[in-house]
Image: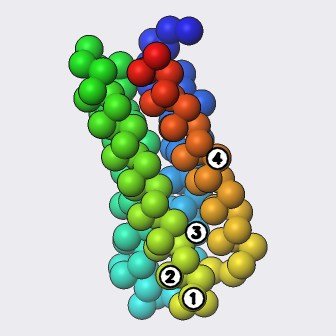
Amino acid sequence: MKFNSVDDLDVYKKLFDLAIEIHNLTLSLPRFELFEIGSQLRRSSNSAPANLAEGFNNKHTNIYLEGISRAQGEIRETIHHLKISFQKRCINEEKLNYFLKEYDVCGKMLTNLGKSLKD
């Protein structure tokens, strides 16, 4: 299947939507965390789809794969910040589990996308 735009990738759409959800979540953090963990969450969650977009459909497959790899790293960083937020009691367990599940799905989607490029 040929994709004309990064917007055609389900994983990109999902990561994009999650970045918006994370942004909105951070607006409800305690004021003193808004620019600490909130900023980290906003940046890493936004970087996941941004890295995928940067590498998308590059004529050099290794650059596309690097974008996928970087997106995976940003997912891991976002998960770390979410766990810290939970431990600091800034988010509840329900929110944490929701995002962990969603990012796990995205990670698997990215892995499969990377495998499809190598075949």
Crowding around mark 4 (Cα neighbors within 10 Å: few <14, some 14 to 19, many 20+) is: some
- Above-or-below relation of 13 to 42: above
Residue identifier under label 4: 105
Could you tell me if the residues under marks 3 and 4 are in contact, i.e. CB atoms within 8 Å?
no
Rendered residue at 53%/73% (across/down): 82
Which mark sits nearer the N-terminus, 3 or 4? 3
Rendered residue at 26%/29% (across/down): 63
Residue identifier under label 1: 87
> What's under tag 1, amino acid-wise?
Gln
Quadrant of the snapshot with the N terminus: top right
Measure how far apart labels 3 and 2 are at the Cα level.
14 Å
Q: Secondary structure at mark 1?
A: helix
- Above-or-below relation of 27 to 109: below
Q: Secondary structure at mark 2?
A: helix
Which mark sits nearer the N-terminus, 3 or 2? 3
Q: Residue furthest front?
A: 119
Residue identifier under label 2: 84
Which mark is drawn over residue 25? Answer: 3
Crowding around mark 2 (Cα neighbors within 10 Å: few <14, some 14 to 19, many 20+) is: some
